[in-house]
Image (spheres, grey):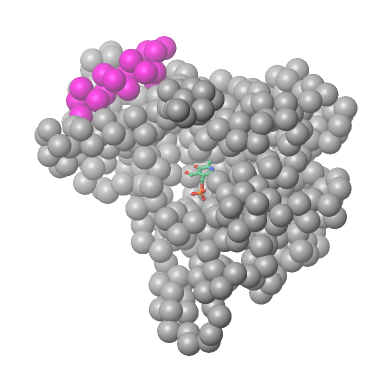
């Protein structure tokens, strides 16, 4: 028999998966070209040429021992390259010893939580949020505490965060650019958050989940979390910025200003090993080291964002232009976002209700999909808009 807690979590399920499976069912019934699937956040651009060249070059390297274990934190040369990147961004002197290569951002978050949580410790999660955060927290016997962002600006609500802090609060997970809202938290928000957390009865670590850090549009910049927040632990990956989601490569970087820095940087590789990750994939550590300054062609995502924005606005939807990420997050025209998502599926359009991100009243659409899908959906969205009195 499987564990009660896992059975419970599986029952709650992921709305992303449910809607993706609904898309698959509709495609089997009506043909893929007649279904407009905006459910799953799977980057659909190919990795950049620097990555493909690095893969070819490294695959031909005859040096013996390249496929063996290495230090649990990863190759020193890769960690030095990452430390250089993080130091430049933050303006701090981040040593290679503060960097641990991980199995994606998901691996980094699990390692960080494992390293800092005692049973019953609370983790503040700002909604809307990536749904796995609650499971990741539960994996390490933590208690997720969901705090909604402001319903209009989708920025952190500092009064609500203040009210949520207790003597058991040990961490807060921050995700900017945000999945699903596409909002980038401005520097003032980070500064205010740092000040607020410093009032807490004990140290609260900020786990900064930043896989969309490089996917920002209109030449905007993402204020650096480590630069503004003292107890920051960066948990991120190249899943989106290099389209390497399936290759599971990311990193964790501990700010040199973190409380208990020396113990923390020893605990992190220990947790990487004992969680069974052991180390991040060897081959892709070498690939990202070679392609550390590359990224996918953002212009292509920007074009699709603009195209889908136009389709939705023409159909009468109220939707903000996302600053980063690969999602649009319009308001649901009815309060019940789950019912709205189900109504869309009747027109062969699959999207994810905001409820799946702890933020009802909105829906999420991933625009990392083909132009044909986006353009093809226009008619269905006009009909849906009419059905809900939007046009
Ligand atoms: C906000 C957020 N965090 C973490 C992840 C997981 O990233 P990775 O594939 O690098 O584990 C995702 C994946 O979609 C995400 O959207």
Q: Looking at the image, which residue is at 60% across and 35% down?
A: 139
Between 231 and 112, the one nearer to me in the picture: 112
Q: Looking at the image, which residue is at 62% across and 23% down?
A: 146
Query: Which quarter of the picture shows residue 382?
Result: top left
Q: Looking at the image, which residue is at 45% across and 18% down?
A: 361
Q: Looking at the image, which residue is at 15% across and 42% down?
A: 33
Q: Is residue 146 above or below residue 105?
A: above
| Highlighted magenta segment, given as a residue range | 332-348
Q: Is residue 60 visible?
A: yes
Q: Is residue 229 visible?
A: no
Q: Position of residue 26 (x, y in %)?
A: 18, 32
Q: Is residue 211 above or below residue 200?
A: below
Q: Position of residue 259 (x, y in %)?
A: 86, 45
- Is 226 left, or right, of 256 in this rendering? left
Q: Residue furthest bottom?
A: 62
Query: Which quarter of the picture shows residue 377?
Result: top left
Q: Is residue 229 above or below residue 18?
A: below
- Is 150 left, or right, of 55 in this rendering? right
Q: Quadrant of the N terminus?
A: top left
Residue 193 part of the magenta-drawn span: no
Q: Position of residue 325 (x, y in %)?
A: 48, 44
Q: Quadrant of the C terminus?
A: top left
- Is 256 left, or right, of 363 in this rendering? right
Q: Residue furthest front?
A: 1
Q: Position of residue 9 (x, y in %)?
A: 49, 26
């Amino acid at each position: 028999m499987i564990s009660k807690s896992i059975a419970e979590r599986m029952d709650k399920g992921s709305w992303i998966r449910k809607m993706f499976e609904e898309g698959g069912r509709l495609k089997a019934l009506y043909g893929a070209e007649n279904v407009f699937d905006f459910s799953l956040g799977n980057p659909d651009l190919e990795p950049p040429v620097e990555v493909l060249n690095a893969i070819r070059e490294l695959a031909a390297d005859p040096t013996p021992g390249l496929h063996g274990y290495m230090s649990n934190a990863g190759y020193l040369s890769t960690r030095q390259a990452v430390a250089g990147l993080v130091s430049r961004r933050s303006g701090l002197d981040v040593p290679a010893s503060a960097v641990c290569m991980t199995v994606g951002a998901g691996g980094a978050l699990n390692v960080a939580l494992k390293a800092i949580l005692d049973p019953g410790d609370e983790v503040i999660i700002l909604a809307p949020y990536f749904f796995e955060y609650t499971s990741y927290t539960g994996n390490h016997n933590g208690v997720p505490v969901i705090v909604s962002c402001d319903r209009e600006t989708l920025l952190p609500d500092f009064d609500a965060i203040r009210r949520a802090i207790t003597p058991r609060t040990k961490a807060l997970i921050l995700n900017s650019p945000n999945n699903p809202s596409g909002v980038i938290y401005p520097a003032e928000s980070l500064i205010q958050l740092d000040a607020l957390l410093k009032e807490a009865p004990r140290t609260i670590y900020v786990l900064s989940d930043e896989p969309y850090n490089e996917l920002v549009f209109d030449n905007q910049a993402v204020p650096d979390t480590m630069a503004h927040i003292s107890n920051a632990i960066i948990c991120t990956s190249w899943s989106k910025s290099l389209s390497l989601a399936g290759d599971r490569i990311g990193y964790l970087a501990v700010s040199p200003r973190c409380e208990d820095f020396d113990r923390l940087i020893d605990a992190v590789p220990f947790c990487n090993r004992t969680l069974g990750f052991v180390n991040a994939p060897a081959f892709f550590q070498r690939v990202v080291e070679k392609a550390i300054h590359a990224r996918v062609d953002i212009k292509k995502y920007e074009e699709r964002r603009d195209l889908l924005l136009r389709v939705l606005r023409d159909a009468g939807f109220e939707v903000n232009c996302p600053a980063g990420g690969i999602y649009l997050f319009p308001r649901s025209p009815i309060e019940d976002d789950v019912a709205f998502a189900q109504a869309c599926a009747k027109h062969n359009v699959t999207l994810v209700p905001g409820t799946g991100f702890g933020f009802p009243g909105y829906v999420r659409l991933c625009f990392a999909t083909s132009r044909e899908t986006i353009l093809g959906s226009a008619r269905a969205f006009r009909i849906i808009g009419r059905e809900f009195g939007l046009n």
